[in-house]
Amino acid sequence: MGQTSTKYNDSIVKGFIVSALVWGVASMLVGVLAAFQMVYPELNFTRYFTFGRIRPLHTNAAIFGFALSVIFATAYHLIQRLCRVRIWNDSLAKIHFVLYNLTIVLAAITLPLGLNQSKEYAELEWPLDLLIVVWFVIFLVNFLATIFTREEKQLYAAIWFYIASFVTIPILFIVNNLSVPVSLSKSYSIFSGVYDANIQWWYGHNAVAFVLTTPFLGLMYYYFPKHIKQPIYSHRLSIIHFWSLIFIYIWAGPHHLLNTPLPEWLQTTGMAFSIMLWMPSWGGMLNGFLTLTQAKEKIKTDAILKMMLVGITFYGMSTFEGPLLSIRSISALGHNTDWIIGHVHSGTLGWVGMMSFAAIYYLVPRMWNANLYSEKLANVHFWFATLGILLYIVSMWVSGITEGSMWRAIDSKGFLQYPTWVQITEVLNPFRFARAVAGAIYLSGVFVMLYNVFKTIQSSGSGFQEVDLRVKEEGESA
């Protein structure tokens, strides 16, 4: 362990793990508050903590605070090991860490103040956008330079997924955030009307693709085989998965704008590419499941395996549901309803959340050289998270389909059967309350993890003993 620590820069990995824990708790606390505000409007206290202001705070902190911290932690960790070299420049890594967290802090201040571009997943105003460009370029140079100076010739599939993310994200981000500043705190997009909507959802959909999907697939392809000490089921399938996913995903954005003034041919193109996403997505899911069969006997006791199993399952579910919702007739029912909220959170809580937790539980004992404080608590966390996810998405499915059906319902004279919005909202309240409770259950699991990680870090340096999860052949000694 000492030699490994000397060869690799693990302090930057530790920093982003702590960052992920801090922003994870913060984002989910805000998310639970926002969920209860949907049921109890009186919780919208002061103008700074109304739903309209804390909702973008929740999404930004969850995606760009929690998930991106996990991405950077795992990127810094695996790139050094897969390339067999130390990160190219330690100072650049530190600068990246400081500027990144400064951005999240400033976002947490400006969004409740109402300084907002009103663009989904791109709410931050132009000074923060420029700051993001600076630290992302610093990180990208450091990451790519590490690859160019590597000692291992072959680039494993996991690296390709990370490269795709880190090359595509700045293109999406810069184009969508092109704007004309009118003051230090306000700017206007250079795009307008249908062009603005098209660019926004080209960015918005691919933010999901290249922030919440491809890097976590890279995470899966590295940490899953490492944890069970078995190779990925099919390296060839991982390559096919990568190239087909990258090609198809980038064109699916227009499915967010079905039944709008967007040209019909473009809507159809988005729908067609979305449906095609079923194939590569499920290819990756099957590769994960078939890899898992090499350690299936250990699922009962090992929390990391449980989390990866559920994470991969929700990856399959959400990548089936997304294309389904991109079909015009189904989108007409589900668009702008709670069904979409359920779909998004099956991916974020189920896929991103579970894979993030698995990565944290894998990394913390190794980075701090100490056995995990309690495997039992990790399993408790797993069940809190799983039950929270299930209650969340089922309540939102029921609420969303009910909501869409009530919007479309007409009486015998052809008039809307439920013309009053409040009337529909009152029907949805029990489902939304269940969603808020589900979020609280999920958050409780995160607090369990936080305690478990804290106690593990307290025993730093006590020595880490790895558990061998390989399935023994009949007659082979344990």
Image: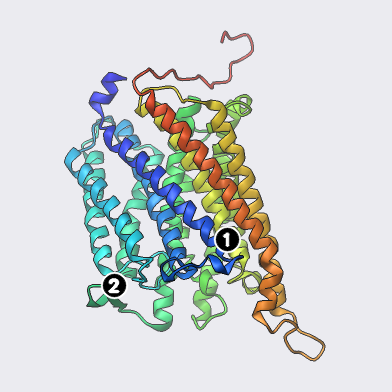
Q: Nearer the viewer, residue 344 or 383?
A: 383
- Residue type for callout 2: Leu
Q: In the image, is residue 270 above or below residue 138?
A: below
Q: Position of residue 278 (x, y in %)?
A: 58, 55
In this rendering, would 330 be left or right of 414? left
Asked if 251 appears above or below 216 in the picture, the reply is: below
Can see residue 122?
yes
Residue in the picture at 44% in, 65% down: 49
Residue that extends furthest to the bottom in the rendered view of this protein? 413
Question: Residue 173 location in percent, x, y?
Answer: 33, 63
Residue 127 screen position, x and y as percent = 24, 66
Instruction: Indicate left or right for 5 with 70 as reference.
Output: left
- Mark 2 sits on what residue? 178
Q: Nearer the viewer, residue 252 or 227?
A: 227
Disc tally is 2
Of pointers 2 and 1, the one earlier in the residue sequence: 1
Q: Secondary structure at mark 1?
A: helix
Name the quadrant of the N terminus. top left
The residue carrying mark 1 is 36
**Residue at point 82% right, 88% down?**
412
Looking at the rendered structure, the kind of residue marked 1 is Phe
> In the picture provided, is 23 more to the left or to the right than 145?
right
Whole-angstrom CA distance, mark 2 to mark 1, is 35 Å
Indicate the quadrant where residue 286 lies. Answer: top right
